[in-house]
Image (cartoon, rainbow, N blue to C red):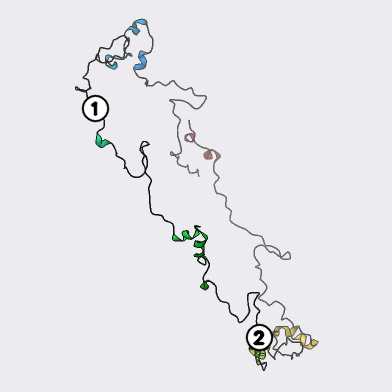
Amino acid sequence: MAAEQKPLDLKNMFTRSLMGNQPLGKWKSSPSFGFGTGSRDTREKVFISMAHVKGIFGRHSPGPAMYGLPSASGPQLLSNIPSQPRWAFGQAKRFPVSKLEQSPGPGAYTIGSAMGRQITSRYKTQPIHGFGSAEQRANWKIFISQEHNLAFYGREGPGPLAYPPRSTMGKQELSTLRSSPSISFGTADRSGLANNLKRAAASPGPASYTLDAAIGKQVLSTIKSVPAPTFGKGSQMHNHKIYINEEINKSFYGRDGPGPTTSTQMPGFYRQPLSRNRTAPQWGFGSAPRFRENKLEVRPGPGHYCV
């Protein structure tokens, strides 16, 4: 039976063009021609002969409209052309103004006051009199005579109300006055009950103490702890571990050993993990093809190569 030929994958196949640049070194690339991209202006720059150059004279020079014609009137920019004289209307007044009209009038001057301080040096400033601002108390300090000073005795001194009267009882602040002895009532408790109340208030009350339980372990060493029996936490599984005699131990035989369902039963077929059991031979179906393919059919055809 011939092997089934696979269809060609045309999408992944490509063929090299014989035109244009050839990537393979054994193929020679043919010359390629195309249309030029140059302009006609560059053609005129190519020198052919002197006769051809004469026909191009003036093409690259500026035309008449490129030059600006300056005005013939007014100042001329070029030095070889003289500027014509110009006339204009004058701006001076027709009738000149006299100097008297240009002088300031009487209302232009500011007339200063004749009273008070004079600003102009040729005028003398008259003395100015005003009311004094000093107090009458300043008159006392002016010395006129000894007789006048007798009338001012005691005016500058403090009055009787300026001195606060000190108490004659109690402690005297002035060292010239002796302090009288002061007697007062005592504040001590006659019966001493107040001291007891203060001492009791500073002491803790009955609720401040914590009473330990009389049952259980005692914290104080002066009190003996009573033995407290409790229920055991051990399980019954520990009973068979206690040795009593040989007869009782016989009843526990097999309790700690594995049961029948604990061990895994190995199958008698296939490979045996135990060395004492022999593994039986096994047979299976082969996976090789029935008809071998021809080696010429496996090779690629002409269409698999890229030329």
Q: Quadrant of residue 201?
A: bottom right
Q: Quadrant of residue 262?
A: bottom right
Amino acid type indicated by mark 1: Leu
Residue tagged by mark 1? 100
Q: Is residue 17 left or right of residue 169?
A: left
Q: Residues within 10 Å of mark 1 (few under 14, many from 20)?
A: few
SS category of the residue bearing label 2: helix
- Residue 72 location (% of width, % of height): 25, 13
- Residue 269 location (% of width, % of height): 64, 65
SS category of the residue bearing label 1: helix
Which is nearer the eye, 85 or 208?
85
Which is nearer the eye, 129 or 238?
129
**Which residue appears farthest toward the left when viewing the image?**
94
Amino acid type indicated by mark 2: Ala
Nearer mark to the viewer, of 2 and 1: 1
- Residue 295 location (% of width, % of height): 55, 39
Residue tagged by mark 2? 202
Q: Residue at x 73, y 83 (%)?
A: 238
